[in-house]
Image: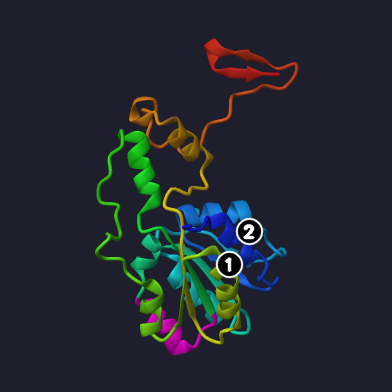
Amino acid sequence: MPLAPARVMRELDARLSPGDVVISDASFSAGWICSFLPAKEAGRNWIFARGQGGLGYSLPAALGAAVARPEGRVVNVTGDGGFYFAIGELATQAQQGLRVINVVLNNGILGWLQMWEEIFFDGLRQSVELETKESQPDLAAVGAAMGCTGIRVEKPGELGDALDRAFAADGPVVLEVRIDPRATPLQSFRRRLEEGAGGRQFDRPGATYELRPWTKSAGASVVEEEGVIAE
């Protein structure tokens, strides 16, 4: 404890049907899905934030998907930071009786930004905390207060039964899962955090993904002075 997001994805994968729609919020949520949640079939069943929306877009997007496919089920995977942006739309999900399972990976922090600060700004930690020891919002309880089924998971052994209950529900669900705040799907972040070099070694903010080295095909020649690659 707290849970690894990869474990959450594995349990979710075991319960998804081919026709279910999966919506990913921006930030780490997309990475966990891409790495550990395989698509069941081809089709427009997977909606990602890349190039389509910013943090917090997935909960409103789930509304549209659920209305477009009233006979199906929509699974919205988001972090707590993204979830806060449009949390009021849970009332809309409840009013309309939409079959949306909101899986909230709650680590109590804006994880991407916190790791960015640690890696590129020499351990800075500012304006990223979403909870304190004295104040830990219960997102499952918020969902229940708005008319959804609220389920909170803190231990690995609770996850399977919680997902079974969520998938059996007729209306919207908020499934809050407490996850490891140091978990990240980005290999470059993991490596740099392990190295502990801080901002001194990585002086190029924006280099989230490591560039692959340039290569040339066999028989190709490179004319550097003219900036031309000639076969």
The reply to whether residue 155 is visible in this rendering is yes
Q: x, y percentage for residue 197?
A: 39, 28
Of residues 177 and 212, the one nearer the viewer is: 177
Residue 220 x, y percent position in the rendering:
70, 17
Q: What residue is rendered at 36% in x and 73% in y?
A: 87
Q: Residues within 10 Å of mark 1 (few under 14, many from 20)?
A: many
How busy is the neighbourhood of tag 2: few (under 14 within 10 Å), some, or many (20 plus)? some
Q: Residue furthest right?
A: 218
Q: Are marks 2 and 1 in contact (CB under 8 Å)?
A: yes
Q: Residue at x 57, y 67 (%)?
A: 157
Judged left or right of residue 169, residue 80 is: left
Answer whether residue 220 is magenta in the image. Answer: no
Quadrant location, the C terminus: top right
Q: Give the mark, 2 or 1, whose residue is nearer the N terminus.
A: 1
Which residues lie in the magenta part? 88-99
* Vertical order, 16 against 147 (above or below): above
Nearest to viewer (mark 2 / mark 1): 2
Q: Residue at x 59, y 18 (%)?
A: 228
Q: Which mark is residue 22?
A: 1
Foreground pick, 226 / 9: 9
Type of the residue with mark 2: Leu
Judge whether residue 91 is colored magenta: yes
* Mark 1 element type: strand
Measured Cα–Cα span from mark 2 to mark 1:
10 Å
Please, what is the three-letter code of the amino acid marked with disc 1? Val
Q: Position of residue 7 (x, y in %)?
A: 58, 58
Residue 51 showing in the rendered view: no
Q: Is residue 67 above or below residue 199?
A: below
Specify the quadrant of the image occupied by residue 227. Answer: top right
Q: As displayed, is residue 196 above or below residue 168? A: above
Residue hosting label 2: 37
